Amino acid sequence: MTEVREKAKECEKSFERLLQIEEEVGEGGKAGEQKDDTVRTADHLARFRMWAGNIGVFAIGHASLDYRLKGSKEMKQNMLELLCTLQEFLRRGMRMYT
């Protein structure tokens, strides 16, 4: 089974990629709307990192979310599904610029 940490890392990388794409697009054209999008994406990335830090997604050992969820397959599956949904929304955001 996929670890929550792995899926969260994929989401973080997708946030970073979306931010990079928005910054590149903003440099080349309509700066107003894209700048707003870039700021929103940066804010959401910061919130994601804060959330991940608060619940121990990237922690190691007994502090990690994966360790704490090892006794509850249902809760772990729910967390993975939420992260998969987030990943899909991030992919859709990236496709808007291609």
Image: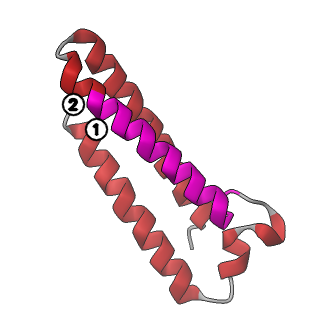
**Contact? badges 2 and 1 (CB < 8 Å):** yes
- Determine the residue located farthest toward the right in the rendered image: 61
Residue nearest the viewer, comparing 41 with 57: 41
Q: Which residues are magenta?
A: 36-58
What x and y, as percent, mark residue 52?
59, 58
Question: Compared to 26, does 16 lie above or below?
Answer: below
Can residue 67 be found in the magenta stretch?
A: no
What x and y, as percent, mark residue 77?
49, 79
Q: Is residue 44 left or right of residue 58?
A: left
**Total number of numbered discs in the rendering:** 2
Q: Which residue is mark 1?
A: 94
Q: Which residue is mark 2?
A: 97
Question: Compared to 73, does 84 lie above or below?
Answer: above
Question: What kind of residue is marked 1?
Answer: Met
Write down the quadrant of residue 5 in the picture.
bottom right
Question: Residue drawn 32% across and 27% down?
Answer: 22
Question: What kind of residue is marked 2?
Answer: Tyr
Q: Secondary structure at mark 1?
A: helix
What x and y, as percent, mark residue 46?
52, 44
Asked if residue 82 shows in the view, the reply is yes
- Determine the residue located farthest toward the top in the rendered image: 28
Question: Residue drawn 65% across and 62% down?
Answer: 54
Label 2, residues with CA under 10 Å away: few <14, some 14-19, many ≥20 = few
Q: Is residue 82 left or right of residue 71?
A: left
